[in-house]
Image (cartoon, rainbow, N blue to C red):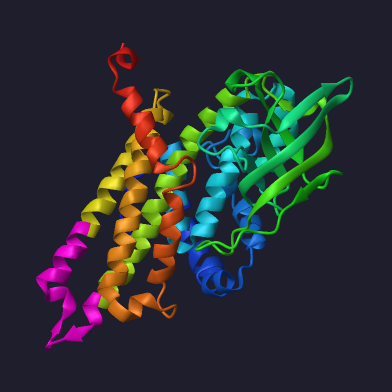
Amino acid sequence: MTVERALPTPEAHDLIDLTRDLIAKEVAPRVAGDESAGRFPREVFTTLGATGLLGLPYPSEYGGADQPYEVYLQVVEELAAGWLAVGLGLSVHTLSCFPVAAFGSDEQRAELLPDMVGGELLGAYCLSEPASGSDAAALTTRAVAGPDGYTVDGVKAWITHGGVADFYMLMARTGDKGARGISCLRVPSGLEGLTYGVPEHKMGMRSSPTTQVRFDSVRLPQSALVGAEGEGFRIAMAALDGGRLGIAACAVGVAQAAFDAAVAYAGERRQFGSRIIDFQGIGFMLADMATQIAAARALYLEAARLRDAGRPYGTKAAMAKLFATDMCMKVTTDAVQVLGGYGYVEDFPVERYMREAKVLQIVEGTNQIQRLVISRALTPESRR
């Protein structure tokens, strides 16, 4: 079903219409085949860039669209409903542009952002490592400063767009142990010593490559540094607040797609002389699914409006990511149950939605980490 959206401007309605048209023409005809074959849809991202959808929340003076996060996230949701690899890919790209947009110098923004948000380049975000995931401050990839810039050595893991991105937003250690020794560096692809692992064989999102990114004496100029030395961990955490809202929007999109498929099937499938949607066992299940989706959408939009208003939103972003992704896992599992045996085969998309839902509980901070973020915000000292 088409979601009725309360959008702040007529321009925002036009963007949603544009997104839905793009999904119908560019995404829907190829998603099943590309997912089955594990093909990365690079040209879809080129199209997103050409239509202005890759730079929605960034300033128009740098090629963005000056859209509030509230609007951007609803575009992400629509794209994720059509194809999670595309919706999550947009979220990751936006996350990768954030450090330059928010912490870069005026010269860096003027030089780099137009191509980054205008669709010429696709980004990846390099924080996690093989032995450093939830404990991001323990990362060991090192960037050693020299007279001409930095030399980088180390390995990053679980990198979306690894091997296909045009630039990598890298968090590396430039100082002592701990969060204060981390800096943010922009690494263009194609540099000597920059290599990639074999793409991971994943349960879902097979068309979105996830690889290790390896740095073997990669040389970077001083201008690669984004923000000040030692500011990288703060940059990374600020980026992740917005990224968690992107994942929440993706989760709502996938859940909506699974729900729509379940409602359509239940309205057509007949057993014992009646449509199965008319049986309370199925009808009540669908009612719960609809309610949970609506609640998750309202939560991520509330957090987005706080962000747009310049107010603290990190805790609400953690809540939105936690609730929406757990909801998505439940809704997609129930959608498979509604379809019965048909839900378990690739002829119907709900089995793909269920496989995709699982990763959303893990990326951008596991849901256990989200609970930690939320619980810490409830302590008396944090509320002073």
Query: In the image, is 302 to the left or to the right of 244?
Result: left
At a point 77% along the width and 35% down the height, the residue shown is 153
> Vertical placement of 362 versus 38: above or below?
above
Q: Residue 189 location, x and y as percent?
A: 78, 46
| Image x and y of residue 307, in percent | 42, 29
Given residues 267 and 219, the one toward you in this image is 219
Seen in the picture, residue 127 relative to 330 is either above or below; the reply is above
Near-viewer residue (142 or 283): 142
Write the start and end of the magenta stretch as one range: 266-288
Q: Is residue 280 magenta?
A: yes
Q: Does the rendering let one see residue 357?
A: yes
Residue at 39% from the left image edge and 42% from the top image edge: 367
Magenta span has 87? Answer: no
Where is the N terminus found, in terms of image quarters?
bottom left
Vertical arrangement, residue 67 with respect to residue 328, above or below: above
Describe residue 269's horizontal placement relative to residue 283 as left or right: right
Residue at figure coordinates x 30%, y 67% from the top left: 335
